[in-house]
Image: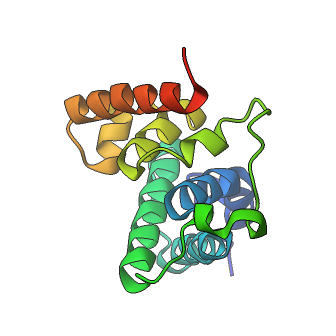
Amino acid sequence: MPEKLFAGLTYNQTVQKYSHTVAGVCVMRLQNYADAEDCYQNVFMKLFAQSPQFSNEDHLKAWLIRVSINECKLLLRDNRRMIPLDSLKGRAIQFSEDSGDMSWALLKTPQKYRDVLYLYYIEQYRVKEIAEILKLNENTVKTRLKRGREALKKIYGGD
């Protein structure tokens, strides 16, 4: 049986290349590693089971991000008794505020800004691409970026 290809990549190559992206989206959305792992697995299971056709790797990556967001929404809808990461205090994995990583600050921003900031700064998508992935108007994305940056400034304590 021939191996499935996704935009020219085998399934294993796809998982290796995009696992960080899918995991990042899930953690940023859910703020809970156990649930993020579940969504992560579901995304790659759907990729394997559905075997959609992709025109290129950008299309594949956008599909993975969109499915990741949808999986997270589904989990949140079905499991409304979640405990926020901040309420776990010493028991949760903490991001270091001293590191160059801005993940800890992103986790403190409101969800609607967090998605846009993550896709723009971490995944390096352009505004138009973010609008397509999140199914938002480009001006909405720009507004959320601006307000998200303001929220990050408050978290960082200045410029």
- Residue 82 lies, in percent from the top left, at 50, 78
- In this picture, residue 46 sits left or right of residue 99: left
Residue that protrudes farthest toward the top in the picture: 159
Quadrant (top left/top right/bottom left/bottom right) for the C terminus: top right
Residue at left offset 59%, top offset 28%: 156
72 versus 6 height, above or below: below
- Res 40 → quadrant: bottom right
- Residue 16 lies, in percent from the top left, at 75, 57
Q: Nearer the viewer, residue 31 or 11?
A: 31
Q: Nearer the viewer, residue 153 or 6?
A: 153
- In this picture, residue 135 sits left or right of residue 21: left
- Residue 109 lies, in percent from the top left, at 47, 44
Q: Nearer the viewer, residue 87 or 21?
A: 87
- In this picture, residue 137 sits left or right of residue 86: left
Quadrant (top left/top right/bottom left/bottom right) for the N terminus: bottom right
- Res 87 → quadrant: bottom right
Residue at left offset 44%, top offset 64%: 67
6 versus 56 height, above or below: below
What colour scheme was applied to this rendering of the protein? rainbow
- Residue 45 lies, in percent from the top left, at 58, 78
Residue at left offset 56%, top offset 49%: 107
- In this picture, residue 146 sits left or right of residue 32: left
Residue at left offset 35%, top offset 48%: 112
Task: Give the number of marks.
Answer: 0
